[in-house]
Image: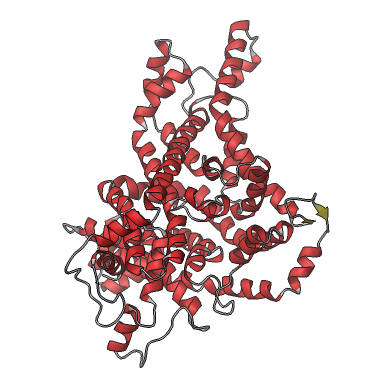
Amino acid sequence: MFTTFPLVWLAAVALRARGPVFGFPPALWPWPPSLVHVATVWQTMPLPRFFANTLVLVGAGVVLQVTLCAMAAYPLARMEFPGRRLITGLLLATLMLPGHIGLIVNFVTLLRLRLVDTYAGVVLPGAVSVFGILLLRQAFLAVPADLEDAARLDGASEWTIWRRVMLPVVRPALAALALFEFVAHWNAFLWPLVVLKSPEKYPLAVGLLYLSGLFAHSTRAVAAGAVLMTLPVVVVFVFTQRYFVRGLLVGALR
Amino acid sequence: MRPARRSGDPRRRRCSPQPRGRLARRWRRTATAYLFLAPALALLGLFTFYPVAVGTLLALFDYDAISPPRFVGLAHFRALAADRFFWIALGNSLKYLLVVPVLQALSIGLAVAVNVPLRGIVWLRAAYYLPVVTSMVVAGLLWRWLYEQDGLVNFVLVRLGVLERPVAWLGHPDLALFAVMFVTLWKGLGYYMVIYLAGLQAIPPEYEEAAAVDGATRWQVFRGVTLPLLRPSILLASTISAIAALKVFEEIYVMTGGGPMFRTYTMFYYMFDKGFQQLDLGYAAALGVVLAAAVLVFSAVNFRLFRHGGWTYY
């Protein structure tokens, strides 16, 4: 009750056509229901634009994250080469680093690379996470050696083994990471806020706050925007709860 | 933890004379391994290792991203000691730690409550989890409305007789910080609940059953058996939560902007203002270092836990 009630209230505000938003008693039953505010927010505010931006940022973020982490984790788990222990140790040590100090320098780096106010500037600094690598390394370690040996006897290259043997086996871990990153990127706020300067490039999280300032008088429209932003995550979450919770527990160790 | 080794013992191999082919193969394997690692290591190097190292050094310089950095030694730290806003921000960040014990206690309670094999319990758990996947911007806006003078929170509290008249929660100097903390609590509850749920489910039921058979009450079983066995989870969740509390930013940015009268101004907020709004990057880095010192205490604990079996949590 306590956790979902405010969200229900939000949806009710967004779906009611008229009447005071505030005041007593609160109207929880959106009657008559109406999509007028959803339409308003969709047509008169740059919401479709923010949606498209978010999709680009989330898509790039998740694909890069899963691919690069899966690539990096594979040799760390399954190959014998000089430097393997050193790199693994270094990655583990990173978990202790205070990441917020890096924010400032990352911003300077982006200035130098002329990536401020670009999508690349938003995505690249978070494109690989140490956690992703360590999680997938753990998954690769659990793959039985016979599978790999059989492929090796057939003369498969490391790349083929990775692609055709390993990735399919660790799919649950990949899914967990992807889901976790999906939500993280979808809701990411601080870094896009710092990097992006032009409102037409804003993702939903930043854009919504921007709109709430511009349209302070039309609470219902902003609420409709908030509902539209939350809906996809909730839908994904409901359908993938199991993987999701796994991803979360991994994230807890981030 | 150890990877399956596929051909012989490498130590023995090094001692024996190596035929050309094997050496070449080893080189190839090393090259392949680093090719796999290259993109990730390059990005991590540029955006994780380098920034933390340079960011720490930056605290000793004056830098505005335009003119070249100028070495000032410990001047920033001396300035911090005399900086009123620094002490306000530090005080508020430390105050924010108050959210940790409350949040953990409630999450444990909740986890115990939903750790029952009932049909549909999954949906109840999911309900608690919804705020976690909600964007902080949405949560912040939502609570900003709920906290309005004529908002729902006031309505309920006045109706229940807790309050005599409505309060401007986010505008009140003494209440604003707690009002924001409450949102952190609301949003974090489901997250920590899941950690504790995993911890609870790792406890063999025999322990609790044995205690119950010995005539312990439910409360005694919880205090004497469950809670001690849950200790690793509690430590893990508390450190995560403490680090997050020290670094709190988004809630505050969305809901109060640091106000009223800097009563919700925190370390991270100050660093953000100095660094990204005023481009006083050296000073911001110094703030970052002080915050890091506070965080490091907690992350050191977290790191040790992580090494000692933290992986069993997923």
Which one is nearer the viewer's eye here, B82 or B115?
Answer: B82
Which one is nearer the viewer's eye here, A43 or A223?
Answer: A43
Residue B116 in view (yes/no):
yes
Side (left or right) of A107 relative to A149:
right
Which one is nearer the viewer's eye here, B71 or A166?
Answer: B71
Please, which residue is most extreme toward the front here?
A44
Classify the position of the N terminus of chain A by image quarter: bottom left
Q: Relative to B265, is A67 above or below?
A: above
Exactly how many numbered labels are in the figure? Answer: 0
The spot of residue B22 in percent (x, y) is: 58, 10
Residue at 36% x, 63% y: name it: A222
Which one is nearer the viewer's eye here, A25 or A253?
Answer: A25
Residue at 44% x, 62% y: name it: B234
The spot of residue B111 in percent (x, y) is: 32, 63
- Tell me the colour scheme of the image: secondary structure
Please, which residue is most extreme toward the top here?
B20
Residue at 65% x, 15% y: name it: B15
Q: Relative to B88, is A123 above or below?
A: above
Side (left or right) of B9 relative to B202:
right
Q: In which quarter of the view is residue B108 placed?
A: bottom left
The spot of residue B208 in percent (x, y) is: 28, 62
Residue A181 in view (yes/no):
no
The spot of residue A183 in percent (x, y) is: 39, 49
Q: In which quarter of the view is residue B116 placed?
A: bottom left
Side (left or right) of B9 relative to B54:
left
